[in-house]
Image: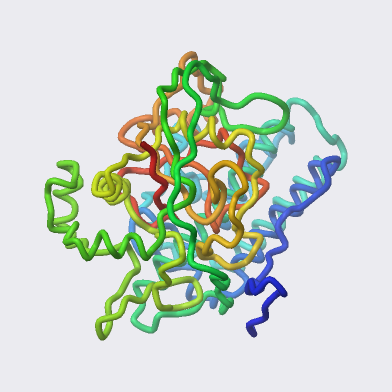
C-alpha cells in the first residue's frame, strides 16, 4: 500500500477490521467481528501460502482457519444441538490440536502434508459452522451454559490470529524470494529513544492475578498475595541499537553471560543475532512482514529467546523482571500500544514518553520474564477437555507478558500470562530489564 503519514509523522498502517465494539455489544456481534478479523489476516495470501508448514512449531494458515472452526463445532455445536452431525466426520481428527479427551489428533509436524481438504473446502466449513453458531447466539443470547465456552472460543481464535502472522513470517523468511505479506510503511522514529531509566516498584505484599468482570483464562487465577522486594523496572523496552552493542561486545561467544542450556543452544544452532537478522555488505537487515528492511536502532529488539534476553540482562548488569513485578507495575497502566489493529505488524519506536511509569508495557513485543510458567496457589483447571487448554503445559515454559504488534488489543490485559519454551524466537518477543 502507498506510504502515508499523519501530522505526528507516524506512518499509517494497514488498519485491520478488528473488533472495537462498544461494551454492550452482543456475543453474536463479537463473534462476527472476530471471525471477520481472521479472514482479513489471510486476505493477502496466494493459495499456495495456505498449505505450507515451515517447521513443526508452526502451522499452515489453512489449518488455523480450520482449527478455530473446529473449536466451535466441537465445544459449542455438539453440546447445543441434539443429534448434531459434524460437517465432515474426519475433521475432528484432522483439526484437533492437543485435546486428548476429545480423541486422537493428526500429527502436528505433518500438518503441511494435508493438501486436502482444500482451502475452498475449509472456507465452506467456516461458513457452515458460522451459520449454526450465529443461529444459536441470536436465538439464545447469553445462554449461561454456552456463553463462557463461546467467549473462550473467541479468545482462542484471537490467539490463532497472532499465530497466523508469526507462522507466516517464519514461512516467508525461509523463502529466498523474501515475500511481502503486506507492504506497510514503518512508523517513523521522531527522536532517538530517551536514555533507559528506572521506575521504582513497591515493596511488600501485593496481589496479582485476574480480578473483576470480563474474560480471563483459568491460568490467570486465583488472585493471590505475593511479596515484592524493592525493585526497579526499566522505563522502556531494549532497542535494536542497544542490542547491537551487546553483539559487538562478542556476547554470543562469551559463555560467562549465558545459562548452561542457553550456551549449548547458541553453539548448536550457530546463533549470532536475533532471528530474522541478516548481515549483507556489513549492514544488518531484518525480515519483516513487509519484506527485508534495514535494522533500525530505535525499534525494540524482537525475536530473541529467553536465553538471549537473560544473557543481555546479565551483560547489562541487570536481570529480567518476575511476572509479579511486571503485573504490579502494569495493573494501573492503560492497555495502549502498537497492536495488530494498527496494521504495522512490526515493533514501533517509542514515540510518546510516559509521564509516569514504564513505557511500552503493552504491544510491540512480548516481554520475557524470569518466571517459570507454573500454577498459581490454589489453581484448578476447568473440568473436562477444556482443562487441557493451559494446565498441561505448566512445565519447561517461561512466562511472557504484555502482548505484541501481532496481538489483538481487545485480547490483552495486565494479568494475561503467555508462555513459550526458553529457546523460542519465532514469536514477537523482546526485552525489558529489572534490577
In the rendered view, tell whether residue 350 sits above or below residue 212.
below
Disc tally is 0
The answer to whether residue 41 of the structure is visible from this angle is yes
**In front of the other: 376 or 244:** 244
Residue at the image position 55 percent from the left and 57 percent from the top: 406
Give percent across and percent down for residue 68: 59, 50
Residue drawn at the location 50% of the way across and 76% of the way down: 290
Q: Looking at the picture, does residue 157 appear above or below residue 182? A: above
Image quarter where the N terminus lies is: bottom right
Q: Quadrant of residue 139?
A: top right
Q: Quadrant of residue 188?
A: bottom right
Of the pair 84 and 109, the residue shown nearer to us? 109
Q: Is residue 11 above or below residue 217?
A: below
User: Which residue appears at 50% of the width and 36% of the height?
Assistant: 417
Q: Is residue 374 left or right of residue 352?
A: left
Q: Residue at x 85, y 35 (%)?
A: 140
For the rendered model, the colour scheme is rainbow
The furthest residue to the top: 378
Can you say whether 263 is above or below 143 in the image?
Answer: below
Q: Position of residue 69 (x, y in %)?
A: 62, 50
x and y, in percent, of residue 258 in the image = 18, 46
- For this rendering, which residue is in front, 68 or 434? 434
Amino acid at each position: 500500500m502507498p506510504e502515508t503519514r499523519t501530522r505526528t509523522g507516524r506512518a499509517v498502517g494497514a488498519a485491520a477490521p478488528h473488533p472495537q465494539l462498544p461494551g454492550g455489544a452482543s456475543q453474536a456481534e463479537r463473534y462476527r467481528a472476530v471471525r471477520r478479523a481472521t479472514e482479513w489476516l489471510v486476505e493477502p495470501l496466494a493459495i499456495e501460502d495456505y498449505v505450507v508448514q515451515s517447521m513443526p512449531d508452526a502451522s499452515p494458515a489453512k489449518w488455523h482457519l480450520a482449527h478455530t472452526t473446529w473449536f466451535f463445532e466441537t465445544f459449542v455445536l455438539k453440546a447445543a444441538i441434539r443429534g448434531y452431525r459434524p460437517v465432515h466426520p474426519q475433521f475432528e481428527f484432522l483439526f484437533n490440536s492437543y485435546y486428548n479427551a476429545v480423541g486422537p489428533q493428526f500429527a502436528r509436524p505433518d500438518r503441511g502434508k494435508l493438501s486436502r481438504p482444500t482451502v475452498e473446502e475449509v472456507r465452506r466449513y467456516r461458513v457452515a459452522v458460522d451459520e449454526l453458531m450465529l443461529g444459536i447466539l441470536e436465538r439464545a443470547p447469553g445462554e449461561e451454559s454456552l456463553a463462557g465456552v463461546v467467549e473462550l472460543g473467541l479468545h482462542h481464535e484471537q490467539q490463532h490470529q497472532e499465530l497466523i502472522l508469526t507462522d507466516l513470517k517464519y514461512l516467508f523468511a525461509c523463502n529466498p524470494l523474501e515475500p511481502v505479506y503486506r507492504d506497510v510503511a514503518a512508523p517513523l522514529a521522531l527522536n532517538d529513544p530517551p536514555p533507559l531509566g528506572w521506575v521504582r516498584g513497591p515493596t511488600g505484599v501485593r496481589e496479582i492475578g485476574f480480578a473483576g468482570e470480563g474474560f480471563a483464562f483459568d491460568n490467570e487465577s486465583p488472585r493471590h498475595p505475593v511479596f515484592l522486594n524493592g525493585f526497579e523496572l526499566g522505563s522502556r523496552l531494549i532497542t535494536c541499537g542497544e542490542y547491537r552493542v551487546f553483539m559487538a561486545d562478542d556476547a554470543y561467544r562469551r559463555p560467562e553471560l549465558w545459562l548452561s542450556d542457553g550456551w549449548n543452544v547458541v553453539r548448536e544452532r550457530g546463533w549470532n543475532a536475533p532471528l530474522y537478522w541478516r548481515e549483507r555488505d556489513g549492514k544488518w537487515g531484518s525480515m519483516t512482514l513487509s519484506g527485508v528492511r534495514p535494522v533500525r536502532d530505535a525499534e525494540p529488539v524482537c525475536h530473541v529467546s529467553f536465553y538471549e534476553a537473560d544473557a543481555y540482562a546479565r551483560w547489562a548488569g541487570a536481570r529480567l523482571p518476575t511476572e509479579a513485578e511486571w503485573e504490579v507495575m502494569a495493573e494501573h497502566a492503560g492497555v495502549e500500544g502498537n497492536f495488530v489493529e494498527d496494521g504495522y505488524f512490526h515493533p514501533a519506536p517509542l514515540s510518546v514518553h510516559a509521564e509516569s511509569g514504564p513505557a511500552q508495557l503493552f504491544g510491540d513485543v512480548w516481554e520475557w520474564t524470569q518466571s517459570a510458567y507454573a500454577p498459581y496457589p490454589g489453581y484448578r483447571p476447568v473440568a473436562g477437555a477444556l482443562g487441557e487448554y493451559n494446565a498441561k503445559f505448566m512445565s519447561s515454559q517461561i512466562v511472557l507478558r504484555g502482548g505484541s504488534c501481532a496481538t489483538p488489543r481487545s485480547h490483552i490485559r495486565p494479568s494475561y500470562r503467555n508462555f513459550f519454551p526458553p529457546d523460542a524466537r519465532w514469536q514477537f518477543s523482546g526485552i525489558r530489564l529489572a534490577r
